[in-house]
Image: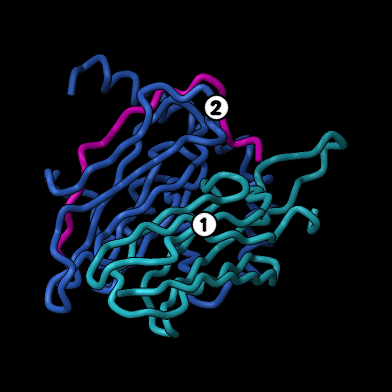
Chain colours: A blue, B cyan
Amino acid sequence: MTSNLKARRTFLHTVLLGGTAVASGVAFGGIGKALADNVPGWPAKPFSEHVLAAAMMDSIGTTKVSVSSKITLHAPTIAQNGGSVPITVSVDYPMTPQDYIQAIYLFVDHNPDPLAGEFHFTPASGQAYFQGRIKMKKTDHVRVIAKTNKGVLMAAEPKVVKVTIGGCGG
Amino acid sequence: MSASSGSPIIRAPSHAKKGEIIEVRSLVRSPMTTGFQKNKQGQIIPAHFIQTVTVTFNGKPVSHFDFGTAISKDPYLAFRMRAEQSGTLKIVWKDNKGGRWSANARITVT
């Protein structure tokens, strides 16, 4: 990672923290109410975190995962509309009852809620794969982490998506 | 706002060969609001979003997806499944306001 990129990330982080302080009243009003009626089994804790490290700790139990070439993350280099950024993830891994990808976790580093989704699979899935669309507040890293049924974690190479118009309006 | 939820759609192949991995595409309407935004009157728009998507085939679990508020409005989702026998694919969507929708697709495996 270049020092330039590091400096930019620190800057983004500072901006985010400033924004959080101003918006915290809004956050409590909104999400707090939402959590009262959650679907049973929906993992409220990791989805309610506002910082990437906390969301990762709550969902996968660590913030450090080695990159594996087995996971492919497709996302656009430039997204004009941050409200709808197409994401495709696939894992090249056998899906046998003994050894399979149990879950893929999708994060956007500086979104208000960094955990975007958890995608759970079984051997009947045939392949750990999904395609969807996510909201991105601004230019940021998208990262995905896969977990096997034995608890082994692997990460895709994080992808930077340049967002022209932020997409947290909806 | 409730009028903009539901209308689930599944697109899956009607026929597949045994052992083939097929792709299923799905769509459901939901505002997917985050609870962070305000409307023009300055009032907070409550969070309203699909939280779980559950996929079964002939009643057996295939996959299960948990969504946060960062999934886009009217969530589109594609996933894969190994076709082992003929039967019915079912997807159930649930949101944080008690909304529940389901859709089926028949797949013939030869």
Circle 2 or circle 1, nearest the eye: 1
- Expressed as whole percent of the image width and height from the top left, the position of residue B66 reads 46, 63
Residue at horizontal 38%, vertical 79%?
Answer: B86
Q: How many marks?
A: 2
Q: Residues within 10 Å of mark 2 (few under 14, many from 20)?
A: some
Check disc 1 and report the residue beneath it: B26
Of all chains, the one bearing label 1 is B
Let me know if residue A162 is in the magenta part: yes
Q: Which residues are magenta?
A: A152-170
Type of the residue with mark 2: Asn
Which quarter of the rendered picture does the C terminus of chain B lie within?
bottom left
Looking at the image, is A118 positioned above or below residue A168?
Answer: below
Q: Nearer the viewer, residue A6 or B76?
A: B76
Residue at horizontal 13%, vertical 72%?
Answer: A99
Looking at the image, is A150 positioned above or below residue A167?
Answer: below
Let me know if residue B99 is in the magenta part: no
Q: CA distance from mark 2 to mark 1?
A: 21 Å
Check disc 2 and report the residue beneath it: A81
- Expressed as whole percent of the image width and height from the top left, the position of residue B72 reads 56, 44
Q: Could you say which quadrant of the image residue A147 lies in? A: bottom left
Q: Nearer the viewer, residue A19 or A48?
A: A48
Q: Is residue B49 left or right of residue B20?
A: right
Looking at the image, is A84 positioned above or below residue B99?
Answer: above
Q: Residue furthest right?
A: B41
Which element type, helix, strand or loop, lies under badge 1? strand
Q: Residue furthest bottom?
A: B59
Which element type, helix, strand or loop, lies under badge 2? strand
